[in-house]
């Protein structure tokens, strides 16, 4: 009876033990294993068998060590292997030994085990537990990766790029060969985030990262610093020619259109380049120098690249001072609105005025719009300045004749402001201003993030009754596509096509004719910007352009002068008859084969089309010569006239006068002969 009760008690304990085993194995927190005295498996849990995608019975009889795989290249793995091997052979207990499973998947276990002996001390085998560490290790690896790599693009992050630069400089010291640093900033990226949202912006950054890696290739390591800033470290690469080529290719690839979730997105890039000398440069100085070069690239018009030069330190300090002054310029009353006439070509009557912001600094005097407008965009002042111009222009023109319009530039930032339509409507109502007299000039920048919001803003502005003009037409990527979908009333032909259009050596006239034909078919007006000579005006009139804006009819003027001109019936064109090609006045020596004799000649008054040549040998008109200009290279031209030791030569191809400039040590450098913020009298009328 006693034996029966003891047997029942033992059976109950065994059932409870099995229940505990089942619960532990089913919990997923671990599994059991057991071997005999020969090291072959006599028991395995289902969870362990699942790691090998088989049944537990298929593992029984196999050596336990066959289930383990050790990465011989890892010092940690070798150490764990020795620990486990020692304990198994010495029949010592062990715990929390990390091993890798011998499976196709990257599976890691933590093993613990105890040796088993019978009452006589004979070894029976090992029994123990295992825990799957795969997810834990993945999490740890991911944490380690995130500490070094950007989670969005997968590129090295700021910390790893700093480490890469430090290592490149150390290596440069040992190899006696320097390294270079690119600082890359995306132009107009914020506009994409603001209009299409951050998910589209994130997708754009991933595509940008792919393009940067493709361009850089084996030349260097690309990383993301955060936001829309990227960096590239180029160990051992210091040749300015190669660096310039890489920078240009990089800018070109990044600036090509992107298609993201059906949206066509266009951005740009600016690049600052710093070159580090072996054993002399440090990471901090190279980062600072590339940052200064990047600012110079942006100041040069964006979509540019600049090499660092020492003068940039003082320029950056001055730029910061000017930015601080710009933030206070409106409150100080330093900004004012200038008005440039827009004239009907057929009748030469005033059609309207373009309203342009000007800044008369209290100590520096007039600051060029080409300088302070980009600065305003960067520091967030462009919205306030745009509001000021719109308010001042409408208030002034409210007292002008009803047939005189005003044109106001609307920056992409203003256009994408959700409140822009309400703001325009409020100003029109406040000054009782006829909506059709207001023309809003818009550049392709508003289309860089092509979205429903853009279309909605166009529709709402048109519903107010204002006119819309596409500014700088022909200089962007796909202006035809913009004309197709946006309700423009006018196309403004960029001055780059207009100035010198009457020259027979240019195709500008054909381009203008095509634009006019396109505009007429779409029932749109055309305005030619930058007309300065009578020859160009005559051609513009012949080509059928509707309106003209340029110095030939007047420079931007104060409100009082514009008011008087608005009340007059006509304005007369004043200016030069034509534009003469720029000429290089200094004499240049050259070599040419004249009548089969190698002869030294002298070139003067060199233009893009030809030059005056002094030559001791007689030369016949119509003769073709190859002229090797010393330090420049060969050009080919035909003799047009010859008299008394001189002759005129017309080049067969347009000659780049830039080739005559002195060779520079670094490509794409910007020589600052005056403070950067001071512009010339011929700055483009920019609003």
Image: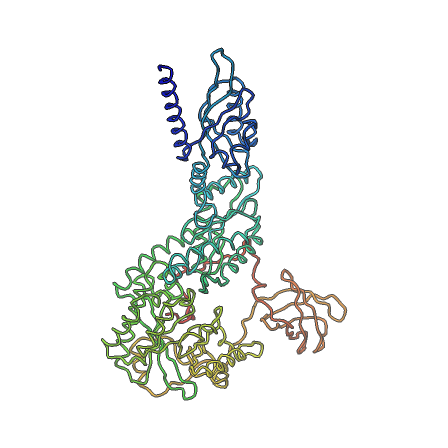
**Quarter containing the C terminus:** bottom left
Viewer-side residue, 5 vs 531: 5
Location of residue 392 in the rendering, given as x and y in whole percent from the top left corner: 28, 72
Q: What colour scheme was applied to this rendering of the protein?
A: rainbow
Q: How many numbered dots are placed on residues in this image? A: 0
At horizontal 48% and vertical 47% (from top left) the residue drawn is 155
Left or right for 541, reference 505: left
Q: Quadrant of residue 567?
A: bottom left
Location of residue 302 in the rendering, given as x and y in whole percent from the top left corner: 45, 61
93 vs 454: above or below? above
Viewer-side residue, 570 vs 53: 53
**Quarter containing the N terminus:** top left
In the displayed orientation, state which residue is furthest to the front.
1
Location of residue 215 in the rendering, given as x and y in whole percent from the top left corner: 55, 54
At horizontal 48% and vertical 74% (from top left) the residue drawn is 480
413 vs 620: above or below? above
395 vs 73: above or below? below
Location of residue 655 in the rendering, given as x and y in whole percent from the top left corner: 60, 69
Viewer-side residue, 509 vs 123: 123
In the displayed orientation, state which residue is furthest to the right.
596
In the displayed orientation, state which residue is furthest to the top.
120
315 vs 25: above or below? below
């Amino acid at each position: 009876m006693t034996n029966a009760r003891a047997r029942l008690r033992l059976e109950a304990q065994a059932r409870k033990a099995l229940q505990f085993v089942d619960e532990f194995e089913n919990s997923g927190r671990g599994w059991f294993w057991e071997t005999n005295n020969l090291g072959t498996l006599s028991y395995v849990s289902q969870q362990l068998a699942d790691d090998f995608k088989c049944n537990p019975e298929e593992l029984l009889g196999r050596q336990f060590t066959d289930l383990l795989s050790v990465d011989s290249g890892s010092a940690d793995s070798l150490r764990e292997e020795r620990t486990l091997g020692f304990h198994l052979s010495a029949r010592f207990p062990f715990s929390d030994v990390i091993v890798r499973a011998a499976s196709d998947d990257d599976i890691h276990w933590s093993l613990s085990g105890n040796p088993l002996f019978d009452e006589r001390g004979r070894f029976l085998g090992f029994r123990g537990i295992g825990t799957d560490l795969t997810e834990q290790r993945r999490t740890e690896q991911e944490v380690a990766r995130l500490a070094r790599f950007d989670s969005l693009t997968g590129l090295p992050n700021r910390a790893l790029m700093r480490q890469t630069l430090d290592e490149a400089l150390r290596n440069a010291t040992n190899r006696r060969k320097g390294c270079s640093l690119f600082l890359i900033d995306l132009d107009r990226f914020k506009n994409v985030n603001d209009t299409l949202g951050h998910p589209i912006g994130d997708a754009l950054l991933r595509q940008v990262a792919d393009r940067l890696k493709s361009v850089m290739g084996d030349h260097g390591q690309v990383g993301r610093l955060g936001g829309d800033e990227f960096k590239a470290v180029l160990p051992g690469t210091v040749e300015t020619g190669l660096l310039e080529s890489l920078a240009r290719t990089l800018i070109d690839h990044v600036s090509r259109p992107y298609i993201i979730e059906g949206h066509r997105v266009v951005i740009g890039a600016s690049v600052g380049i710093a070159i580090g000398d072996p054993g002399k440069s440090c990471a901090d100085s190279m980062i600072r120098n590339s940052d200064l070069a990047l600012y110079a690239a942006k100041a040069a018009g964006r979509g540019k690249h600049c090499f660092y030069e020492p003068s940039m330190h003082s320029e950056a300090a001055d730029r910061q001072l000017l930015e601080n002054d710009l933030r206070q310029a409106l409150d100080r009353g330093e900004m004012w609105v200038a008005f440039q006439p827009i004239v009907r070509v057929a009748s030469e009557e005033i059609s309207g005025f373009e309203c342009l912001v000007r800044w008369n600094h209290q100590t520096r005097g007039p600051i060029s719009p080409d300088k302070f407008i980009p600065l305003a965009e960067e520091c967030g002042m462009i919205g306030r300045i745009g509001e000021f111009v719109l308010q001042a222009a409408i208030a002034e023109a409210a007292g002008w004749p009803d047939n005189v319009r005003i044109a106001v530039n609307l920056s992409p930032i203003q256009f994408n402001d959700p409140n822009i339509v309400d703001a325009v409507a409020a100003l029109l109502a406040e000054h009782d201003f006829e909506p059709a007299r207001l023309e809003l000039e818009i550049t392709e920048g508003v289309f860089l993030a092509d979205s429903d919001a853009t279309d909605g803003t166009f529709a709402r502005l048109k519903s107010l009754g204002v006119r819309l003009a596409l500014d700088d037409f022909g200089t962007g990527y796909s202006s035809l596509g913009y004309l197709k979908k946006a309700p423009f009333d006018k196309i403004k032909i960029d001055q780059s096509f207009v100035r010198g259009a009457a020259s027979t050596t240019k195709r500008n006239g054909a381009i203008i004719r095509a634009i006019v034909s396109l505009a007429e078919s779409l029932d749109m007006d055309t305005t030619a910007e930058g007309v300065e000579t009578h020859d160009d005006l005559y051609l513009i009139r012949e080509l059928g352009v509707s309106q003209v804006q340029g110095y030939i009819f007047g420079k931007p003027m104060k409100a009082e002068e514009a008011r008087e001109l608005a009340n007059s019936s006509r304005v007369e064109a004043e200016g030069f008859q034509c534009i003469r090609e720029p000429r290089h006045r200094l004499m240049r020596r050259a070599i040419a084969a004249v009548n089969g004799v190698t002869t030294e000649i002298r070139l003067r008054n060199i233009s893009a089309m030809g030059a005056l040549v002094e030559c001791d040998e007689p030369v016949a008109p119509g003769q073709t010569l190859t002229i090797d200009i010393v330090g420049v290279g060969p050009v080919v031209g035909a003799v047009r006239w010859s008299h008394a030791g001189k002759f005129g030569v017309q080049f067969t191809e347009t000659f780049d006068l830039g080739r005559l400039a002195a060779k520079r040590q670094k490509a794409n450098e910007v020589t600052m002969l005056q403070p950067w913020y001071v512009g010339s009298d011929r700055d483009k009328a920019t609003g």
